[in-house]
């Protein structure tokens, strides 16, 4: 009997946990990113003035400046969150260019999980900045009648994060796969390059929006 979950076939079961292709691919990508980070750290210790060090410094400075502009102060935890989301989503999107690999971000379950992480990070950041009581009171400002709108806004932007990334990556992957099947590998190469660019852009947009949402909760807490 073939089991399916979220529209994906279960490859095998890890006890009571179903394991799908998306879960396997995302796990491999996560391990690859961790390995790359360890290799980069080793390279930085050997040559602090080399090209890897310069690229790492530019990336960290860009993320730190983005967080400062949004949150109004340095937030190392938010830099880590935004950077991790960008690198993971970008790697997932680029993995879809490999033959036979479906990008994990073309799964609604994966994009929903990423959006839920951002959704949960917002109250955590707000409570850290203002406390539980102060954060909850923010839903009643400037008028208690706006409470339903605040709640709907939180839920709708989470849904929008998930659906935007899912729709763009699924459609792009399907179009490229269809062209490769019909015309061969060389003809769709320009479209594949465009798909890679879109994948990086979507990772950037997701990370920036996550920074904006979490940073807004921090800044509101200081108002």
Image (tube, rainbow, N blue to C red):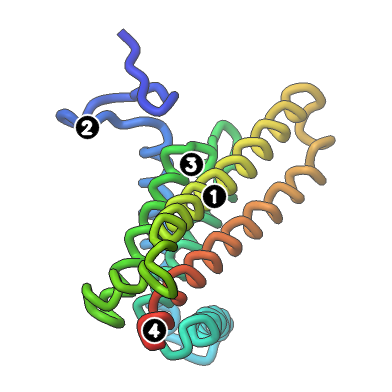
Q: Which residue is mark 4?
A: 75
Which disc number belongs to residue 17? 2
Give the distance between the C-alpha atoms of the residues marked 1 and 2, in whole angstroms.
28 Å
In this picture, is 170 found above or below 32?
above
- Are the two marked residues, 1 and 2, in contact with CB atoms closer than 8 angstroms? no
Q: Which residue is mark 3?
A: 104
Which disc number belongs to residue 160? 1
Work out whether mark 3 precedes mark 4 in sequence or the reverse, and give the earlier one.
4
Helix, strand or loop status at disc 3: helix
Helix, strand or loop status at disc 2: strand
Helix, strand or loop status at disc 1: helix
Q: Quadrant of residue 58?
A: bottom right
Give the distance between the C-alpha atoms of the residues marked 1 and 4, in whole angstroms.
25 Å
Q: Is residue 49 visible?
A: yes
Q: Position of residue 68 (x, y in %)?
A: 49, 87
Quadrant location, the C terminus: bottom left
């Amino acid at each position: 009997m073939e089991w399916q979950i979220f529209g994906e076939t279960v490859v095998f079961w890890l006890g009571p946990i179903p394991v799908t292709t998306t879960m396997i691919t995302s796990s491999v990508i996560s391990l690859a990113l961790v390995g790359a980070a360890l290799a980069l750290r080793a390279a930085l210790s050997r040559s602090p003035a080399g090209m890897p060090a310069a690229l790492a410094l530019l990336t960290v400075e860009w993320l730190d400046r983005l967080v400062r502009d949004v949150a109004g102060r340095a937030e190392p935890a938010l830099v880590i969150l935004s950077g991790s989301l960008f690198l993971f989503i970008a790697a997932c999107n680029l993995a879809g260019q490999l033959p036979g690999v479906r990008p994990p971000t073309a799964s609604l379950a994966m994009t929903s999980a990423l959006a839920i992480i951002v959704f949960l990070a917002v109250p955590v950041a707000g409570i850290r900045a203002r406390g539980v009581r102060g954060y909850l009171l923010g839903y009643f400002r400037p008028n208690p009648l706006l409470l339903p709108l605040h709640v709907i806004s939180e839920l709708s932007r989470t849904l929008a994060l998930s659906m935007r990334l899912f729709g763009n990556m699924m459609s792009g992957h399907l179009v490229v796969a269809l062209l490769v099947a019909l015309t061969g590998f060389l003809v769709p190469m320009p479209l594949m390059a465009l798909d890679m660019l879109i994948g990086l852009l979507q990772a950037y947009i997701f990370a920036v929006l996550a920074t904006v949402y979490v940073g807004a909760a921090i800044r509101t807490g200081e108002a």
